[in-house]
Image: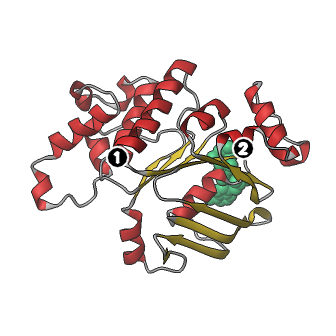
Amino acid sequence: MIRLEGVHKAFGPNRVLRGLDLEIQEGETLTIIGGSGTGKSVTLKIMVGLLTPDQGRVFVDNEEITGMEEDALALVQRKFGFLFQGGALFDSLTVAENVLFGVRNLKPEELGRSDEIVERCLGLVGLKPEVAALKPAELSGGMKKRVGLARAIAHQPEYILYDEPTTGLDPIMSDVINDLIVNIREKLKITSIAVTHDMKSAYKISNRIAMIYEGRLAAVGTPSEIQRSENPVVHQFITGSSQGPIQMPVRSYT
Ligand SMILES: Nc1ncnc2c1ncn2[C@@H]1O[C@H](COP(=O)(O)OP(=O)(O)OP(=O)(O)O)[C@@H](O)[C@H]1O
Ligand SMILES: [Mg+2]
């Protein structure tokens, strides 16, 4: 379980999070929605301790990670797989090396099994073993996302964070990735937190959806609760984004 309590985060005068409360339950997929720049990626980074909140507390499995020493935090971070916004593969490494990058400190008994780990993870995301020898430049956008996904699950994390897993993909490839996310949850029983602009994807992959607005939790509920929400902020976001480009209140851009 992950819990954020009253989290504040500012960058200079830019007060991004202003008292965010959010709880992610064991085994669920929770999707965070909200306009561009509302702090969705920042929230994921705070959950895994890559950014520290200015105020508030963060708990992972009932351990408070805010203020934790580096070594202890590193252990907590191993519980997470992270699919970063944009995929972020290392261009100079092969697919196999990219996948294994997430498996820091292979245990001695695992050292001889790295090919097996790569093959298993590529298989889980629907890629053939031959892909292992390729470099990222030789892959399509959808394949890169899959390799990013394979890397995120390679060290068998308890939690996986997906930042915009379908952005930039065509609708068919987006659907393939959505199915993979659902599959990974079901097969590996990983608790997942996703961020997306794509409501179709949010409805498909989520047990619950949480909307961030003006630095706080504006709403949280099941996909059907969110769809039926009478909260004007939620209503505007979900109808705006399902009709094309996101229409957010003008003041979000100022
Ligand atoms: N390391 C940083 N230093 C300074 N400002 C930052 C940093 N990280 C994020 N920000 C700012 O915080 C705000 C929220 O950023 P964040 O990346 O969380 O937005 P987002 O909701 O993920 O947006 P998008 O949908 O466009 O990805 C933005 O205004 C961004 O410029
Ligand atoms: Mg983002």
Image location (x, y in percent) of residue 175: 52, 25
Alpha carbon distance from label 2 to label 1: 27 Å
Helix, strand or loop for disc 2: helix
Q: Residue furthest right?
A: 250
Left or right of 220 on screen, residue 127: left
Query: Residue 172, relative to residue 38: is it above or below?
Result: above
The reply to whether residue 90 is visible in this rendering is no
Image location (x, y in percent) of residue 48: 50, 63
Image location (x, y in percent) of residue 103: 28, 53
| Residue that carries the numbered disc 1 in the rendered image | 188
Left or right of 150 on screen, residue 166: right
Of 6 and 38, which appears nearest the observer?
6
Query: Residue 195, relative to residue 22: is it above or below?
Result: above
Q: Which residue is drawn at 67% across and 34% down?
A: 199
Kind of residue at disc 1: Leu
Of 83 and 138, which appears nearest the observer?
83
Q: Which residue is drawn at 55% across and 76% down?
A: 66
